[in-house]
Image (cartoon, grey):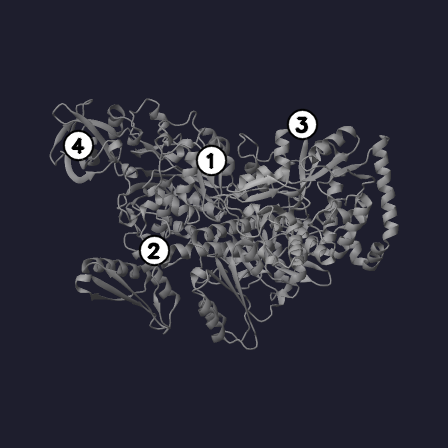
Amino acid sequence: MWRLSSVVKRERNTVTAAAKKLVNHQFRLNKHVSLHQRSLSSAATGSSSPDVAVQLDYYMSLQFAGVACALVNDTYQSKGINSLHFLPTCPVGEEAARVRSFQNANPSTLATLGSVEQNIFTPTLYNDPSLNVTAVASMFRRSPLCVASLGPLKDGDVIGAHEDTVELLQRIFSKQKVVASPRGTKNTDLLDGTYQGIQAYTTTEIPALHHLMESRGMDPNAVTFQVLEDVVSGSSAPQLGYSQMLFAANEALESTDRREAANAFLAATFDGWQHAIRNPDEAIKAVVEAQKMLKLDDESNDHWYDSLSFKREMLALTTNHVKETFVGDRLGVLSPNRWSKATEWLLQDKKDVDPLFGLDQTSLWTPPANLLNGNELAREALEDAKFSAMKFETTYGRKPSLAVITVGELARYEHSQRRVQLYSNPSNSWFTKTDVGKSNGFDVTEINLDETTTTTDALLSEIYKIRDNVDGIQVMWPLPESIDSAKVYNAVPLDKDVDGIHYTGWGSKYPPVTPAGAWELMKAHNVDVQGKHVVVVGRSPIVGHPMAHMLREAGAMVSSAHTGVDKDTFQGLVGQADVVVTCAGSPGCVQADWLKDGAEVVNIGTTFCEKADALLSDVEGDIESKAVRYSPVPGGVGPLSIPMLFRNVANAAWEQQSSSTDKWEQSPATLRKSIHFASYTEALQFAKKVDELSTIMDHHANMKIAHKCVNGVDLEMELFSFEAKELTQKDFDAARAIDLVYAGNPINMKDYSYDLQQESIALFPAEPRGSSKLLRVNSNGQVSYFEHFGNNISSLLEGCHVVFNNSRVLDARLAVDLGDGNEVELMLLDLGNVDPALPCSDHRIQAMIRSDKVKVGDVYSEPVSGAKVQVMDMRGIWEEEEESGGNGSDCVVRIHSNDVISDFLSVNGSVPIPPYLHREAVESDKERYNNVYAKDGGSVAAPTAGLHFTDESLAELGESNISSLTLHVGAGTFMPVRSEDAREHAMHAEHFYVNVGELRSIVKAMEAGKPIAVVGTTSTRTLESLYWLGVKRLRGISGSDDTKQLELGQFEWRGLSVADPSITAVTSFKALIDGMSDDEILIGQTSLMITPNSYNFKVIDHLVTNFHAPDSTLMLLVSAFLGKQNDVTTIYDEAQNRGYRFLSFGDACLFSRPSVKLPSERK
């Protein structure tokens, strides 16, 4: 719960008395002046030191309204601080030095604290560690620092900035010139043209600038401002961290009495902020009184207006920042994740810096561990959505868009304004979606319809009008009883269903946002539901029902209850549950004493009570006495709904923009499309693919071919549902599937190429193993850089289930004597389907002989053993770059030797290091071109992503968090894509062997909510292929039940992807291994080709991989994995600039799919 402070409790009971106290200004002023004078005089004489001393980084103003309220309302005294001393204002940047100096001079002072921006604090402390200060809390979560201008800034424009911020702004605005400028006249200087831009704060200078412009007869809307943390450059944005951050001299953390004093100051300060949030006009008066008491109001400037309207505006902007620091049960909490991001950005050029440098790690001011808090998780999710939206606008020149349709007045919106004031702000509230969109880079259209006049047809008409013009549609629930809800919801296309109304029916790719938020919360706090009894209270179609569905998918045993169930049965269900999820929106419908001891409780349903002026949960009573952990109200699930919604909108925008093809012509009952082909044969081939697809989907298209003489032919297709007499979702799904098969948008390989510098290619692996660099692209597309893979990978992957490819590389490079005294290379290309324990002569093996004169029947000699090598068949030319040895002959050979293949190669072959290294294999390659966990021989190229892992890093991950599979890598992995359009590339097939027990361990991990992190693109292809093979089994497709000869074609996934989009990886894998024992093996081959803009990953959440060659299918795979939001070539170019090493022996990458965070980043 957001626990009410003593001040708020007192105010609720004695509002009149509190008002009278504020009116009695003279009495209170005299009282506090005398207290202040005593503390000042004692400090000056040295006779005694104050309990607590404070160094503010600015004059007393509304940005310290919480401090002022705590001071004026005696809150510091009520918390046990008998003497509180405020130090005089000091020059910016000297706050830490002043705190250190005072503490040294007054060692008996229990705690000396100060306030400052993190972007000043962190570099200052790094440069002078002897300051011995530590960050403990913050009044603002985000820096309000911005640059204001009267239009877009041009190259060379001059920005006026505070002296201490010039270097910071110049780093961000590299194309402009940043100079030090006077603080007091900054707004005037901007309007007078002295500078084209000025450093400003959104909480002060911006509203003041609007007033100044109005006074000059100027349009206030002419001013633009860029918040520094929103200035996106490439794949990242500035990370400035916290503002009005509170730090303490380290002594305050060293003993119980000192910690109590520091904690009392923080508790009183944030109680003061709660008072300011609830009572803004009282807070304004308190600031005026505090200014007189402390005499900290001496600054003269042009960004202050002495009017009540200005003060109210400034205070509202300020408290919006303060509310963003609320976590669990208190304001002011510092997030280690946010702190780390800022530290890494602020000290980017410094090496081996602890990301938590300067942050308190003794838990002085942290919420209780039993709270499943969601505020910080929600803020990070919304920041991710915002970053994605900004990149989308940069890429496509428009913002992701959402339409929200509401019919009538919704009862839950009755107290929306008060809820925004108390608990959130317009930039992140469910009740202010237009403002949320504006603040976070989205276009939001809210359509509000009159309940008394809106019919089903009228509502459908509104949906039809907007559905082709927006990326997402949200129809607010509930609809009036007079409206056919099913018909309305069915009119929302699946790809625009960002609120998940089709989630439990047709399988919307986007789950309902509130259950999705609850599930994110549970995952972030490791609430394990697998095999647990979970009771879901509530059954609404947008919360209770889909929540139960999610939990069942995660392996929970779910019981649903609701307020219509008789009390004894209801109480009995709750009392038996390991986890209780309340979704009723009925205060007190669950009593805390019903709970099973040690249960976990997720409160979703909330109700605002006007009498209590507070948000109430469904659970009433002393929940802490029964539940081991629970989500607070507010601060649990509630804040997550709006980030989930806008995350869905961003994802929908990217997907629709990326997969858009020529539109189908739509009538009320049919979809029609015509595709032109150059020849009748091409049209027939495509028609055959459509027919195969239609069989999979059980929904056939009418097709006919229209001849165009010398101009080719048109294939005309028509989709309709005969029985329904109108378009159904099956029609739209079939149209999407046909578009996927056709893939009318070419995949231009030039878009996935980059200039690989020769010096960037690693010729040898990093020494020792595991010391390579690591590049990280997070779920938001932001890039960070780590100097040492081994020192970071296990902590980054903590909480994941990690999958490795344990295939071992055989010495597959041989030489043959052509018979004329010349020896040429013979490279075995594919050993995936060869048993290395059988004699060589038992096998026909695909090989490359580096000669263009090879023909069937030729017999050559292997010079070491003298074994004969006979050419059995010719497959064609083996194409390779000249610098890699040039072209050869792709053929099938038999090696006439009774030695088993593995022994023959071990004695006569050499390590098949990649040809682009232009060097001979050396002895160390035998070890270093294999993974430490390699087991089953059969690869002719290493699964190189695993080369970075050591026995130590594997031990840190933990055996229970690891699974293995085997995919034998063929030489086709080095084959470049030579066609301009990648869709024309023939993907090489590779053989896999997967132990059923290992796959079951992966299923259990997914059911437990663990994300799947895969090491290498080979493991990725295998797991994704297994998903589609499971779908084939579920669809009953011929051959899919032969577990020893499984096979997946290059683009077979296209038709399968829309046959039943709701099939999860867990469901697919279980179908594949149903009835098999753990020691059995799935055997097959896959030609799966994963391409950008169309493939949606079904299994993989995070990917460890190397830097890949230009024009390779692996570039396509990682581009598809990172999504359109991330330009892989740009990321690679920057990595080269930073000295990263590329290809097989190069450095590593850790990529996350868009919107999928690592568990370590959710903490």
Query: Do the numbered discs 1 and 4 sit on residues whose CB atoms are within 8 Å?
Result: no
| Circle 4 SS class | loop
**107 in relation to 1105, above or below:** above
Q: Could you tell me the amino acid type at mark 4?
A: Ser
**Residue at horizontal 59%, vertical 60%?**
432
Of mark 2 and mark 1, the one earlier in the sequence is 1
Instruction: Between residue 657 and residue 214, name the one nearer to us.
Output: 214
Question: Looking at the rendering, which quadrant does residue 899 occupy?
Answer: top left
The first of marks 1 and 3 along the sequence is: 3
Residue linked to disc 3: 130
Which residue type does callout 3 highlight? Ser
Contact between labelled residues 2 and 4, with CB atoms less than 8 Å apart: no
Position of 1112 compared to 582: left or right?
A: left
Residue 115 occupies quadrant: top right
- Residue of label 2: 1056
Mark 4 and mark 2: Cα distance apart in space: 42 Å
Given the image, on which type of amino acid does mark 2 rest? Leu
**For the residues marked 1 and 3, what is the alpha-carbon distance in whole angstroms?**
43 Å
From mark 2 to mark 3, how far is it between C-alphas? Answer: 63 Å
Q: Secondary structure at mark 1?
A: helix
Crowd class of label 2 (few under 14; some 14 to 19; many from 20; radius 10 Å): some
- Residue that mark 4 sits on: 851
The residue under label 1 is which amino acid type? Glu
Residue 287 percent location from the top left of the image: 77, 50
Q: Position of residue 869 (x, y in %)?
A: 16, 30
